[in-house]
Amino acid sequence: MATPPMERPPRERGVYSELARQRLIESRLTPNAISLTGFVLCVVAGVLVWQGQILLGGLAFVIGSVCDTLDGRYSRMSGKGTQFGAFLDSTLDRIEEGVVLVAVAVLFSQDGEDGAVAAVVVAVLASLMVSYTRARAEALGVECKVGIADRATRVVILSAGLLLTGLGLDVLEIAVYVLAVLSVVTVIQRIWHVRGELTRAAAL
């Protein structure tokens, strides 16, 4: 009977985790470098989708989006974060999503899918407004993270559409319509939320 492999005790795992954390902090890796890597990968994804390499484009978009989730965590963990880094990260996030969606719109346009092209335009505008409503609300002192389609959700929907289409399931158009509808709903949810919060604050 085979002996199951010995697991390291939690204390030992914690030591290794702390050592890895220290190595990262002492390295030259910066949160901005991770943000820029994600940006480059998403631009590559857009080019690949534009060239019809949808599966490869989807994979590049997924990896680039993972970098976008890591830069903030690494910034907090390493203490290397700056105000400009946070600004750069948010700015690049908006560009990355837009670049890939524009490439998708080009594909639909080449196929004569005018309705899908219009849905992409709505998805781009609504995704920008999702971010804007949060930023504007926070400038007014209102926390605004509500809504069914934050960036992570939008990335999952678009990634699924690209990857499944690249694998032979033609669902990219459906994904774009879903993305457009949910993004619009999220904008409405955030506007309603901010109105309610400001009304309550004025009544106090």
Image (tube, helix red, strand yellow):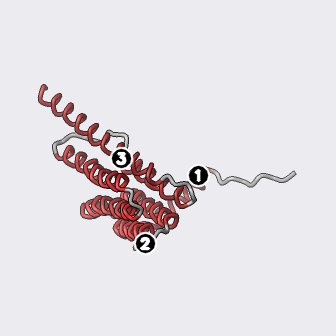
151 relative position to 24: left or right = left
Neighbourhood count class around disc 3 (C-alpha, 10 Å): few under 14, some 14–19, many 20 upward: some
Can the viewer see residue 176?
yes
Q: Position of residue 134 (x, y in %)?
A: 25, 46
- Amino acid carrying label 2: it is Ser
What element does badge 1 sit on? helix
| Label 2 packing within 10 angstroms: few (<14), some (14-19), many (20+) | few
Residue, disc 2? 27
The image shows residue 92 at horizontal and vertical percentages of 31, 63
Dot label at residue 42: none
* Distance CA(mark 1)–CA(mark 2): 25 Å
Residue placed under numbered mark 3 in the picture: 150
Kind of element beneath mark 2: loop
Rendered residue at 35%/47% (across/down): 180
* Position in image of residue 84 (x %, y %): 24, 64
Q: Is residue 185 above or below residue 164?
A: above
Measured along the vertical axis of the image, is residue 139 above or below residue 68? Answer: above
